[in-house]
Image (cartoon, grey):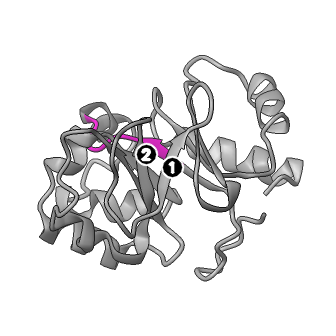
Amino acid sequence: MNMETDDTDDARLLLGMVGWPHPEWVEAYFPEDLPEDWRFTYYANEAGCLLLPATDWQALDAETIADWCEDAPAFFRFWLEWPASADPADARLAAFGSHLGGVLAAPGNAAPAGLPVWRPAGEQAWRGPGGQQLVRWRVAGEDLRGLRQRLQALPVQVRALVLEDVSPARLGELRTLVELLGIA
C-alpha cells in the first residue's frame, strides 16, 4: 500500500474519521473563515475516507452527497453503517457512486443488492470484498509511541483506518507515522 497523491491508486491505506458533522471540529480543525459548505472539501483534502453512522448519512440529501463526491479525490471512499431499518432502495445510495466503499452491515442485516457489504470481523473491525478490512480506533490521549505500536500490528489487509474520538487534525500525525513505518 502507498499513500501517494495519485487519485487512481486503490491500494492506498485510507485514513479518515467517524461521523459528520462534529461541532467540536469547527473550532479545533476548520479555519475560522472557511464557509460551512466548504468544510467537506477541506476535510477530503486531508483524509481518504469517512465512516458515516446511519443517523449521519440518513440526514443528508442526495444533492449534498453528490456535491461531496464531486469535490472529493477519486480515491476517497465513504463507508455507511447499515441498520436493519435502512431502505435498500434509498436514492441517496446512488449519489455516492464510485466513492462508496461499502456498507457496514451487522450479522443478519440485509444489505442492498449490488453494493459491497462489510461484515464484523472482531471488535471494531469489518471485513469486505477480497478480505479487505476497515478498522475503527479510539486514540484520544494516545502518544506517538502507542500509535506506532498499534500501526505496526495492523494486518496488511486493512484498507481503511478511521478514528472516532479526536479532531481530523490528528490524521496528519497518523499519516506521517504510516509513511515513516513504510506500512502504506
Image location of residue 43, percent across then percent down: 41, 56
Mark 2 crowd level (few <14, some 14–19, many ≥20, 10 Å Cα): many
Tell whether position 35 is magenta: no
Instruction: Please state, as top left, top right, bottom left or bottom right, where the C terminus lies in the image.
Output: bottom right
Q: Amino acid at mark 1?
A: Trp
Q: Nearer the viewer, residue 156 or 169?
A: 156
Please tell me in which quadrant of the rendered image residue 136 appears: top right
Tell whether position 18 is magenta: yes
Q: Amino acid at mark 2?
A: Leu
Residue most extreme to the top? 141
Q: Secondary structure at mark 1?
A: strand
- Residue at 25% in and 73% down: 94
Q: Is residue 55 left or right of residue 175?
A: left
Q: Nearer the viewer, residue 149 or 175?
A: 149
- Residue at 59% in and 17% down: 141
Q: Which residue is mark 2?
A: 104
Q: Nearer the viewer, residue 19 or 88?
A: 88
Q: Are marks 1 and 2 in contact (CB under 8 Å)?
A: yes
Q: Nearer the viewer, residue 28 or 51?
A: 51
- Residue at 47% in and 30% down: 166
What's the mark number on residue 118? 1
Image location of residue 169, percent across then percent down: 51, 42
Magenta segment: 16-22
Mark 1 crowd level (few <14, some 14–19, many ≥20, 10 Å Cα): many
Q: In the displayed structure, would residue 123 be above or below residue 6?
A: above
| Sequence-first disc among 1 and 2 | 2
